[in-house]
Image: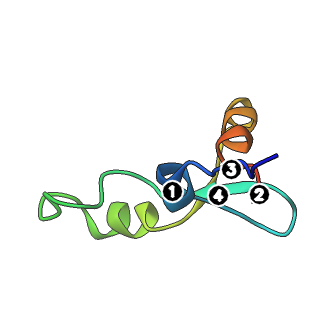
Amino acid sequence: MPKMKSNSGAAKRFTRNAAGNYKRGQAHLRHILTKKSSKRKRHLGEMLEIHPSDVRSVRRLLPYS
């Protein structure tokens, strides 16, 4: 039986931590940054855990993570 493939797009976006949860980066930090406040940009740089309702689909996309 061949190995299952991870979804390469999901592999670049999500990482699994030691507790088994997945973390993700936030959007809106790529361009048009001059009008955004420093506080807003600073908080957008933080990683967040994905919503519990999305865990099942991310786990399917990343079978070996």
The residue carrying mark 4 is: 23
Q: Secondary structure at mark 2?
A: loop
Task: Determine the residue positioned at 68% across, 50% down.
Answer: 62
**Disc 4 to disc 1, how far (Cα)?**
8 Å
Question: 21 or 2: which is nearer to us?
Answer: 2
Q: CA distance from mark 2 to mark 1?
A: 15 Å
Residue type, label 3 = Leu
Residue 13 picture location, percent across and down: 51, 56
Q: Position of residue 1 (x, y in %)?
A: 82, 46
Circle 1: residue type: Arg
Residue 25 higher or lower than 50, as above or below: below
Q: Residues within 10 Å of mark 1 (few under 14, many from 20)?
A: few
Which is closer to the viewer, label 4 or label 1? 1
Disc 3 marks which residue?
Answer: 62
Q: What is the C-alpha distance between the residues marked 3 and 4?
A: 13 Å
Query: Mark 4: which amino acid?
Result: Lys
Compared to 55, does 33 lie above or below? below
Observer-side mark, 4 or 2, equals: 2
Q: Which residue is mark 2?
A: 64
Could you classify mark 2 by the number of other residues whose Cα lies within 10 Å: few (under 14), some (14-19), or many (20 or more)?
few
Mark with earlier residue (4, 1): 1
Question: Which element carries disc 1, helix, strand or loop?
Answer: helix
**Separation (CA) of disc 3 from disc 2:** 6 Å
Residue type at tag 2:
Tyr
> What distance separates the C-alpha of mark 4 from that of mark 2?
16 Å
Q: Earlier in the sequence, mark 2 or mark 1?
A: 1
